[in-house]
Image: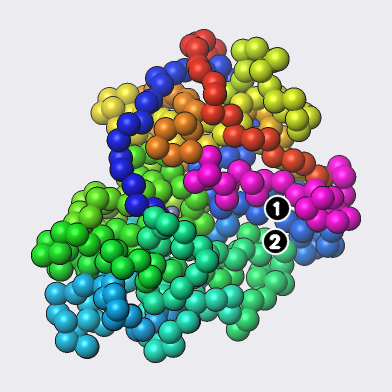
Amino acid sequence: MKKGIKSGCAVTLAFFYATWGATAATGYAYNEIVPEVRQLASISGGSACPVRSHIRAVSSALAVQWSTSLGTNPQTIITQDQTPNGRLAEIEQVITQSAGVWSGVNGSTLQSLAVSVTRTTVQNACGPDGVNSICFNQADLAFTPGVLAFTRVITADRIGVQIGSGAPSSEVGEILDVDIYFNPSDSRTSYATPPALSETPAAYGMESLLTHEVGHALGFSHSAVWSAMMFPFAPTVGTFSGTRPSQGHPDAPLGEDDRTGLRVLYPDPADTLRVGTIRGHILNANPLSLPASPPGVTGVFGSHVVAVDAASGAVVGATVGGWSCSAPGPAQFDGSYAIERLPTGASYEVYAEPLNGAVDPTQISDTTRSLCRNSTSDPGWPPLQGCVAPPVDISFTVRTRPGP
Ligand SMILES: [Zn+2]
């Protein structure tokens, strides 16, 4: 998550060529991985279609450790109770609450997700070791200017991958190791727990930042919806993202876009209400405007497609569209999109816009760059299952044509 200002975004209201019944594979902006098809089909699945990163359906609690090494110069974490034990208890409460936000969404199997939080005194506890860790005092090259926090996710591209002490993957796309890093080295940046935030208006809300990072840990990329928790820019110092979680509404800080995305990634088969899908293609009116390379691109890649509830005017879900895939792959860049898990019995308006506002293609690159593997990226890759993702198209304008 980056420092940023939510302003100056020009939104183009637009429509699109709607076609129904096509099979688009995109659901939301997720962290994707292409299975390792050079291995036996029994361990890769045999298909080069991208798979969404996701945590394994857990029967026991999801284990997370956090490093109690907090740094004192500068002091980056402000708590209300500044006694040594009080600080740790307050920070731990933030961790628990941030995870609770994502396990409080109706229509998602994560509703029953329990998280067990333990402490470690090791300073550099984050790394590819099979242990999910949160670190507040660990330097990293990814801390370029403006980066407040980030999450590193390791995903299995085949069955049987093992990282450190973690269990081997049992399915493709399984998240094997997640580490959340907060920037400890920017002397002008501090983070405050919720009770301390009002007294330290120059600090960033630790709860909001951590809730966003936990979204990455569950498999999300970024969203271009301003009200979404997965919007890539942090809320202004001294403020929270959205409404604070409460006992009755643990998921209150999330945008409806986050909830829809979570339901797509972890669908509850018992949910019969949110089973609607809007599908279509974003196509170039002028085929000559398609990119000259790579070959085979037949639609707009990387458009932001947004579904709005017609009655309330609220954004209910959005996706980054532009591709589809059916086994054995590879991904086809045909302009397809799908917004799934929408409540039925409602009317929606859909528009498409280029990602040329506050959110640009670099902030969703883990979703767009990881859709293809080929003989250049992976020597010996089967040519028929190789592809090259086109650049994200940010220059289009959109015209209306009513769907059938
Ligand atoms: Zn982020």
Q: Which residue is mark 2?
A: 157
Residue at disc 1, secondary structure: loop
Task: Tell me if 131 is positioned left or right of 80 in this view.
Answer: right
Quadrant into which the N terminus falls: bottom left
Q: Nearer the viewer, residue 43 or 80?
A: 80
Looking at this view, is 5 or 68 the one in front? Answer: 5
The residue that label 1 is drawn on is 34
Image-quadrant location for residue 127:
bottom right
Residue 131: horizontal and vertical position, in percent? Answer: 52, 78
* Colour convention: rainbow
The quadrant of the picture occupied by the C terminus is top right
Q: Which percent across, then down, holds residue 5?
A: 31, 43
- Say whether marks 1 and 2 touch (CB < 8 Å): yes
Query: Is 376 one of the magenta-colored residues?
Result: yes
In the drawing, does residue 90 fall left or right of residue 39?
left
Inspect this view and state whether residue 318 appears: yes
Point 44% across, 76% down: residue: 138
Name which residue type carries label 1. Val
Task: Tell me, yes or no, if residue 61 can be seen here.
Answer: no
Q: Residue furthest left?
A: 199
Amino acid under disc 2: Asp
Instruction: Provide the residue span drawn in magenta.
Output: 361-384
Q: Secondary structure at mark 2?
A: loop
Q: Position of residue 335 (x, y in %)?
A: 62, 28
Residue 364 vs 397, above or below: the answer is below
Question: Magenta stretch: residue 43 in it?
Answer: no
Measured as percent of width and height from the top left, residue 136 is found at 37, 74
Q: Residue at x 17, y 86 (%)?
A: 83
Quadrant location of ligand 1? bottom left
Work out whether mark 1 precedes mark 2 in sequence or the reverse, and give the earlier one.
1
Tell me the quarter of the picture where residue 189 sits: bottom left
